[in-house]
Amino acid sequence: MKEAFKTIYEGGIGEFVMKKSKFIATVSPISSEDEAISIIDNLKKKYWDASHNCSAYIIGTENPLMRCSDDGEPSKTAGRPMLDVLLAQDLTNLLVVVTRYFGGTLLGTGGLVKAYQTATIEGLNHSNIITKELGIKLQISTDYNLVGKIQYFIAREHFTVLSSEYTDIVMITVLVPPSRKDFCIKKIAELTNGSATLDLSGQVYFTRVGSEVHLF
């Protein structure tokens, strides 16, 4: 599993006009090809009177699935340029559909490529792009005398704190990158002379949206 990848938290809609042709880019988060196909079909129904509904999507982080469609536009003037934008921004698990209402003026091959890429960028600009990071949940149980040292270490290393519970002991749950797990465990053992109890409980993807941490 990749330790981090870029995707979108919420999709958006961006619009662009070139020589009276209107382009509407709809960006959606997806997790499967069936989901992508369903969204494309629904948008074709919504924009039934449009000239074209071109699409591009990427799914997965290891050997990702990539698909694109020109939907009647000249070959490689719409879907592939849209896909190139997603690849250039290193994004995955998202779908972009660009709807075109023909304005009466032919744009030519170069104009179409520019228009569909610009529309895709507009759609992404109206979406919430995030980085999902892979973290191992680590619960640290310690007494009150040592919690200050541990909290200072966590803050210095920029580990993400999920929760802190204060009872007769202190329990802090943090997310640690897999590549830094052994370092973290070793350091906490040193800081507490081995008195802290550590409990590992699996890997999750997470992201920060404002001051909140979201798990996936």
Image (cartoon, rainbow, N blue to C red):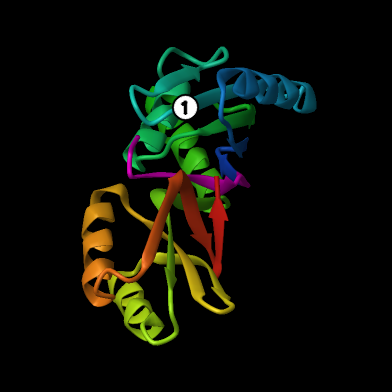
The residue that mark 1 highlights is 59
* On screen, residue 141 above or below 32: below
> What x and y, as percent, mark residue 72?
56, 12
Q: Is 204 in front, or is 7?
A: 204
Quarter of the picture holding the N terminus: top left
Residue range corresponding to the magenta coloring: 1-14
| Residue positioned 52% across, 40% down in the render | 119
Quarter assignment of residue 146: bottom left
Q: Residues within 10 Å of mark 1 (few under 14, many from 20)?
A: many
Left or right: where 122 falls relative to 24: left
Left or right: where 82 falls relative to 179: right
| Residue positioned 24% across, 74% down in the render | 193
Q: Is residue 193 visible?
A: yes
Q: How many marks?
A: 1
Magenta-span inclusion, residue 33: no
| Residue positioned 68% across, 26% down in the render | 39
Quarter of the picture holding the C terminus: top right
> What predominant SS class does the magenta segment belong to?
strand
Q: Is residue 107 visible?
A: no
Q: Element at badge 1?
A: strand
Residue type for callout 1: Ile
> What x and y, as percent, mark residue 178?
30, 48
Magenta-span inclusion, residue 10: yes
